Image (tube, rainbow, N blue to C red):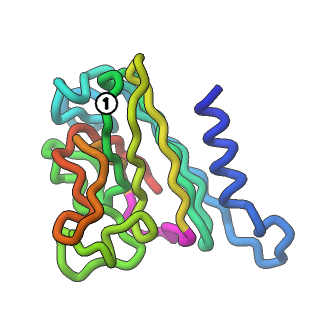
Amino acid sequence: MRYLSLAALALAGVLHGEAASADTPTLRLTTASSRIQSYKPGATGVTYDQKLAPAGAQLSVFAFSSSRSTTVVLNTRGLLPKREYGAHVHVSPCGQAPTDAGPHFQNKKDPIQPSVNPAYANPRNEIWLDFTTDRQGAGAAMATVPWGFNNRDASSIVIHATHTHTVPGQAGAAGARLACLTADF
């Protein structure tokens, strides 16, 4: 029930204020779901650390995006119980190596990569989905930003080892890349 409620809130957040407009932007819906596994060609859900992101854990994403706003909802099951994780939208699909997903998707791209400047690496310019799992290892997060993906490269959600840092020099960093879910935003 919690997952359906988050998806409904996400849709309401994207459509708020747009339904009555004659120039209503096109709404794009993205869904992706996979049990994570060790990398193999064609895998959409990959674990890079089976201790912290066990094979068989489920990652699911729902995203609603228009030119005016984007809401992304992440649901997880089967991760470690009562543990903090970070998660972000990345620019490339999941691959064999954790770095294959590329950097975080940024609405305004930092000219210096990897981006650790809080002027660019922040929850208004990126999609941050930090969460803490419950006693059964389930987690959920939702982020809404006032911009759309607009057919730009946004291709995966990466689960990180810690919640996201915000201080200069570490802004946007969230530890090791533990798992990845390919999603065509």
Residue 117 is situated, as x and y percent measured from the top left of the image, at: 24, 75
Give the dominant element type of the magenta stretch: helix, strand or loop: loop
* Residue at (26, 35) in percent of width and height: 46
Residue 25 is situated, as x and y percent measured from the top left of the image, at: 69, 71
Region in magenta: 146-154
Q: 135 above or below 153?
A: above
Q: Is residue 150 magenta?
A: yes
View extreme (front): residue:
167
Residue 181 is situated, as x and y percent measured from the top left of the image, at: 35, 41
Q: 30 above or below 44?
A: below
Name the residue that disc number 1 marks. Answer: 83
Work out whether residue 41 or residue 88 is closer to the camera in this orientation and state it: 88
Work out whether residue 75 or residue 43 is closer to the camera in this orientation and state it: 75
Query: Does dot 1 land on a helix, a strand or a loop?
Result: loop
Quadrant position of the N terminus in the picture: top right
Residue type highlighted by circle 1: Arg
